[in-house]
Amino acid sequence: MLATQLGGCGKTITGTPRAVGDIDAGTAAGIPIDNSKPSGPKQGVGNAEFTVDNADKGEMDRLAVNALADIYDYWTERMPADFDGQKFEPLKRLVSYDSNGTALKVCNASTAKSVNAFYCSLDDSVSWDRGVLLPMLDKQFGPMSVVAVLAHEMGHAVQFRLGKKSNIGQGTPTIVKEQQADCYAGAFFRHVAEGKAKHFEINVGKGLNQVLATMFFIRDPAGLSANKQGAHGLAFDRVFAFQAGFTEGPKRCARMDPAEINSRIAEKERDEQDEEVGGQVDVATQKNQGLLRKSLDEAFKRTGAAPPEIKDSGAKCADGTSTPPATYCAEENVVSIDLKALKKIATPPKRGQEPGEDGNGIGDFAAFAEIASRYSLSIQKSVGANMEGEKAGLRTACLTGAWAAFTVDKVPGDGDGGLHIAVGDLDEAVAELLQDSSLIAADVKGVQIPSGFARVEAFRVGYFDGDKGCATQFS
């Protein structure tokens, strides 16, 4: 987030960027959260047997083949059921390679240093890097992240087979194809979550959170236009597409077209020289804390709530209450913060590192959003809402999203400047929302709602519908 100019209160973003239906803090689109359920390969199930070019039959190839077997089973059932009886045809070729090993020629390109997985329509193939990419995903996010990446690539194969039935033609922008593929992957994961896959299982709490966090890792670089060739979308947009498929199934994915995606892509193109791309500021300075306070006061001015003070007092209240790194002290109407802890969150991870794990930070917006979440509790208090419980956690995430949207626009003539959201900040919000200790979707006692899926949905409601949408959805 950059120190530039303050966002406008009248921010309007078109589209209906969330799955239809009530948001339940204890479920992922209706499937109850049960973190005692394992996520990963099922025990005692034999390995699938597929012909794979250049396979070494090691652990990563076994993981990939078993994933593809389950994905094949899913589309063999769903394609005819959802698309006028059309049968699913298996891929003509599967390729395994090591990006650090002997190079192959696949899809008219060399695999040397190609840390990737991809579908090629030229020979109807899916290829994966068993040497670097798959082990890296497995180590950082677990085996289901590998399944997610292959489900995405198989989504492209599904598009190729469906053609016009999936709104795909020769001139279809890349971003549409990629968002659809994310959506088809989400639809497949619903199948897994319902216990219907032969080789894999997933719990929809921490297990699904890791899959959603993979979107942060493989998102587009901040500032890449959604209209550019090869654009996949930022994590905020990719997670929506995945959730749409998970919630509503393959038919929903097939309806995605340029008009819809242009209406809901949250962060538009910025010039490559624009300083707002990937901008980070020091959250601990007095100036930036003042700018944060100003943006929050302005964002919620129309509610009539008395704005709380923001004090660096170690995230502790006078009565000893503490929900570090920020605490809302209701009796004093103060947001008490621990700047040292927030500064750690604000330090972005290096490329290739998982955000929020092993001491890694996430970015400045994640830290600012932690403070904003506690500020939003004062708004809830002012209208007599209960500040404890799951509904309070959902409202908190929603109001934090409303504040985020408020910072998008610039106010002409505001010479003093203010906080303005930078490209990539919403991805930081997604990453922070999926952390086990995040306050963005937590009540006044710091109790987080169980469903990471629902946390992101609630934040998105606020971002697109504002505080009025929060009042309607979570009253």
Image: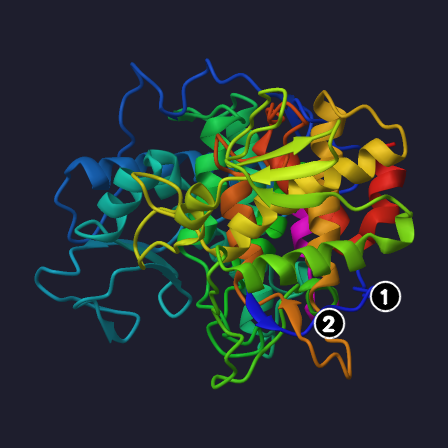
- Does 251 lie within the magenta span? yes
Residue 181 makes an appearance in the image: no
Residue at point 26% right, 39% down? 139
Along the line of sight, the residue nearer the viewer: 101 or 347: 347
The disc at residue 409 is: 2
Along the line of sight, the residue nearer the viewer: 188 or 287: 287
Badge 1 crowding class, 10 Å Cα cut-off, few under 14, some 14 to 19, many 20 or more, is few
Residue span colored magenta: 250-259
The image quadrant of residue 396 is top right
Q: Earlier in the sequence, mark 1 or mark 2?
A: 1
Q: Label 1, on which residue?
A: 10
Badge 2 crowding class, 10 Å Cα cut-off, few under 14, some 14 to 19, many 20 or more, is some
Is residue 428 shown left or right of residue 331?
A: left
The image quadrant of residue 218 is bottom left
User: Quarter of the image containing the N terminus?
Assistant: bottom right
- Give x and y (percent) for residue 47: 27, 27
Majority secondary structure of magenta residues: helix
Q: Does 440 appear above or below 160?
A: above
Question: Is label 2 in a helix, a strand or a loop?
Answer: loop
Along the line of sight, the residue nearer the viewer: 475 or 304: 304
The disc at residue 165 is: none
Is residue 92 shown left or right of residue 286?
A: left
- Give x and y (percent) for residue 282: 46, 61
Is residue 143 shown left or right of residue 383?
A: left
Disc 1 residue type (three-letter): Gly
Disc 2 residue type (three-letter): Asp
Pointer 1 and pointer 2: residues touching (CB < 8 Å)?
A: yes
Instruction: Give the Cα separation between the discs numbered 1 and 2.
Output: 9 Å
Report the residue that reaches farthest toward the front. Answer: 318
Residue at point 52% right, 63% down? 424
Is residue 102 shown left or right of residue 18?
A: left
